[in-house]
Amino acid sequence: MATNAYWEHRGFPWEHDPGPPKNTSWARLFSQTPNYRALAETYMGKEKFRWHFGPMHYRGRLKSKQVKVLVIGQEGAMDESLAHRAFVGSSGGRMQHIVNYLGIDYSYLFLNTFLYPIFGQYSERKIKVLAQNPASPIAKQRTELLDYARKKNDLRLIIAVGTAAKETVQTWIEGLGGQCPDGIADLSTADSHLIGPKAKVVGIIHPGALHQADMRDSVLEDYKRVMAQLEEWVDQDPDWLPCDPGMERDFSIPFEILKKPIPFRDLPAGVSWRLGNGTSAGQRQDEQRSIQLSADIPRGERHDTFYRGLATGSSDGYRDGEGDVPYEPPVNDYGAYDMGPPDAFLKLIMGGYTGLQWPDFVSLGVGAHPSFGGMPLFRGRPDKTTFLVVADPQSVDDLFCMRALCGNSGQHFQGFLEAAGITSRYCILRSLPIDDTGMSVSEQMKVVRHPDVQKMYRAILKKVLDYKDASVVLLMGPLAEAHWDLAGIATALPVVRLKNHSQRNGLQSWQQALAELATLDYPKETQASFQYDGHRIQIPRYDLPYGFLRWQGTSGDRAKRAKREDGEWSPYYYKWYAPDWVFKNKPRPLSSEEIEFLNQLEQ
């Protein structure tokens, strides 16, 4: 089985988090996000929340009876916004080390005080009111989440990370009718039994304090104090906090401040390997309009870069549902997300089987740094497909969307599929699992013709066909056609060839392909017009992993790769942009409940 340095201590990338189980209330509870923007603007008179890249809800286990350790923090940051999971960046790496030190590597759940990142610090009186007043919509939703975690699990340990989290735990326990006699100074004396019969609570300094050089000794002393308390509890009851299978706990080993990478099983399928590697890889830029993702850059290799334009985009093709705002996941259609393909298919496309591995793409002239992990290879449902589509890459949006063909070309192709009567029964395979930006056609074909690449694509194509559900094969672009021809798969299925969206006469080619499809007999999901005028529609929410915002997968190409000052493509940086129409979006009106809450407050 293949492996590489970027998977070290993380498991394998096909071990992914599918999102909230559909038979639980998590997705519904997460979707009931209060109007953070308008609450802050109305009560505080300013933008307090970084809303452009949406909320991040959780990381860890969401099935019943899976969680022993509940970690509560303050907020997320850039890496969390890109991964759509909590505690993924530098602080997440430090907390991962802490739970691992305690013998826990699976049975945990991370939640936050706020679903949105904040501007500045958690120090103003009014932000504390929004966070902790029991009548605050923010506090009420968070309490629902905490109570659901409490009811669905036998919680043994709650770790409050930072001041906001400590106050959150105090608010939670007092709301259950309990007391915290020592306040947030020492939560270990709180009435934690109200959370669970064996639940205990500790609070620690937020690891973000380590950014201040003079705080390291204080943070370490605080963490050692907490470890001593936990050791005492374990000594009193050895069965209180059982280690996870395969894990050990040894308090005689001095605790150190370290970072551990986030397991792939905590993150969505298709996530860039740079996210969750134990450090922070994202940087907010362009006045909150963008987030840059950086590679694991070798020492001495940094260089100045630039991006052309702000990828302003337009709302053409955007469709939202009732109650939706573009900077959050769907509200009423909260169950519309992709939980991932069959496990065997995902393992196959990621090179998980002996004898079926991808080659060293850097040696084949691929310029992007390997720490990014390449580009996602699929979108759709390989085991429930009418159209098997192989499509040439057209943008780098896929790196951030975690699925194939999600940029401008993919959004246009979604309109093509709709014209053909297909809305969900498709499997789109990207013809190159790497970023081909800057590569010539001959260089691209060299990759396609590599023996290992041929072997992989033949196995992948055969895997989809073996599900015996496909009715038509569509090949979009010369690389896709080359893959199919080189695979030499014997099939009676009709094969329709069409140009890339960006190729000359691409629209005419798509219209001709629809005319050809009109002559074929295949099952349709909706009435097919077989007419396409070049419009685009958004990528369906059920094609994207859990947590993606309504604007993502819309508005054309949203991502760019950086260039060096000499004009060559940088191997180290990509950037994801919120579209201009979202950036200028105003908050939705306050609800009657939110207005009632604000009217009760002293200004």
Image (cartoon, rainbow, N blue to C red):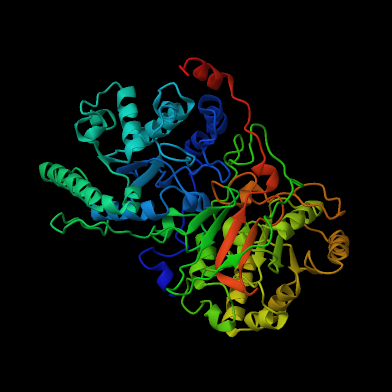
Residue 359, horizontal then vertical, whole percent = 53, 80
Among the 4 quarters of the image, the one containing residue 340: bottom right
Residue in front for this viewpoint, 203 or 9: 203
Residue 535, placed above or below residue 499? above
Q: How many numbered dots are placed on residues in this image?
A: 0
Residue 194, horizontal then vertical, whole percent = 27, 28
Q: Look at the image and tell me whether residue 402 can be seen.
A: no
Among the 4 quarters of the image, the one containing residue 461: bottom right
Left or right, 171 with respect to 511, comes to left
Residue 603, placed above or below residue 300? above
Residue 282, horizontal then vertical, whole percent = 49, 57
Residue 454, horizontal then vertical, whole percent = 62, 80
**Residue closest to the far left:** 236
Left or right, 300 with respect to 248, comes to right
Q: Look at the image and tell me whether residue 201 can be seen.
A: yes
Left or right, 470 with respect to 498, comes to left
**Residue closest to the far top:** 600
Left or right, 436 with respect to 270, comes to right
Residue in front for this viewpoint, 425 or 260: 260
At horizontal 30% and vertical 54% (from top left) the residue drawn is 213
Residue in front for this viewpoint, 22 or 478: 478
Residue 30, placed above or below residue 343? above
From the image, which quarter does the N terminus lie in? bottom left
At horizontal 85% and vertical 62% (from top left) the residue drawn is 507
